[in-house]
Image: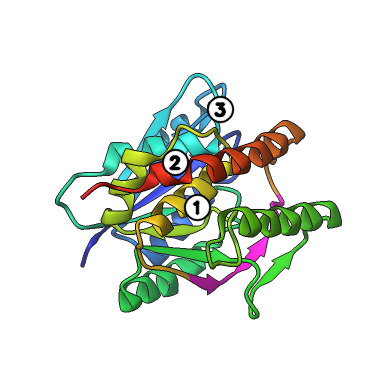
């Protein structure tokens, strides 16, 4: 069985982290969990240290740099060229349900994907407890991303994903220069699509957070739209030379 690394970017998620780790370990007990924390304090680190979890690494970045760069940081810390590994990114607020991990990993392996996206917009998917404003913004963002980037997926902006080692190699060599936040999710997708990697989607139940606080704000939204335009202009740069 390939090694599994689960990258979890956190920002003020101390109310969720203990329960999240316990739930992940019930489903994939041998997974290596990597927490990249941009909180001002290191309360999450104290929780990790107190509970002495096995196969859990905690990194505290003193200056908040955003979700996208946190995922890149976690991937870089755990990627080893030539070593086969499955990399998963997911949020800490339970909008990405740990119970889905097992079936997602099995599908990823069965289909030999390089990227598997848990899509909120497939027929059997559900979005629970989202305010109408978030639903409208998310839908419009995905429509715009599809028009601009032309990748054949339904969800460009959900950060519940599985990557192959091949995909992570391309991401670490080509991505991370366009901006931060959720635009990096579209950047990853574009880079992998241009290099003709196998991309698939699976249904998911997306549950809006009930604890902690959201990192989505107006500035992040504006930067994401600007980032899409930049991606369209420079997309040919993501091709890996052979």
Image marks 1 and 3: residues in contact by CB distance under 8 Å: no
Of 215 and 163, which appears nearest the observer? 163
Residue under label 1? 90
- Say whether disc 3 or disc 2 marks the residue closer to the N-terminus: 3
Residue drawn at the location 44% of the way across and 27% of the way down: 60
- Neighbor class of circle 1 (other Cα within 10 Å; few <14, some 14-19, many 20+) is many
Range of magenta residues: 201-210
Picture quarter with the N terminus: bottom left
Residue under label 2? 71
**Is 73 drawn above or below residue 40 in the view shown?**
below
Dot 2 falls on a residue whose secondary structure is helix
Determine the CA span between mark 3 and mark 2: 15 Å
Dot 3 falls on a residue whose secondary structure is loop
Residue under label 3? 39
Instruction: Single out the mark in the foreground, 1 or 3.
Output: 1
**Residue 116: where, in percent of width, then height?**
44, 65
**Residue 239: where, in percent of width, then height?**
35, 48
Q: Is residue 54 in sight in this rendering?
A: no
Q: How many marks?
A: 3
Of 17 and 90, which appears nearest the observer? 90
């Amino acid at each position: 069985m390939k090694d599994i690394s689960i990258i979890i970017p956190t920002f003020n998620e101390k109310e969720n982290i203990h329960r999240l780790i316990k739930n992940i370990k019930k489903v994939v007990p041998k997974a290596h969990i990597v927490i990249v924390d941009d909180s001002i304090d290191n309360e999450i680190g104290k929780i990790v240290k107190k509970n002495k979890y096995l196969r859990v690494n905690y990194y505290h970045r003193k200056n908040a740099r955003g979700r996208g760069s946190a995922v890149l940081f976690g991937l870089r810390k755990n990627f080893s060229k030539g070593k086969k590994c499955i990399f998963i990114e997911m949020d800490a607020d339970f909008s990405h349900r740990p119970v889905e991990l097992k079936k997602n990993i099995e599908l990823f392996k069965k289909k030999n994907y390089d990227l598997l996206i848990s899509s909120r917009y497939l027929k059997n998917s559900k979005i629970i407890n989202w305010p109408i404003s978030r639903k409208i913004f998310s839908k419009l963002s995905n429509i715009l991303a599809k028009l601009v980037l032309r990748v054949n997926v339904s969800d460009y902006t959900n950060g519940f994903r599985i990557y192959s080692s091949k995909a992570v190699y391309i991401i670490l060599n080509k991505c991370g220069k366009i901006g931060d936040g959720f635009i990096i999710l579209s950047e990853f997708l574009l880079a992998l699509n241009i290099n003709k990697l196998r991309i698939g989607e699976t249904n998911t139940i997306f549950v809006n957070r009930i604890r902690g606080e959201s990192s989505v704000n107006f500035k992040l939204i504006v930067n994401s739209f600007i980032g899409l335009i930049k991606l369209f202009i420079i997309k040919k740069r993501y091709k890996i030379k052979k």
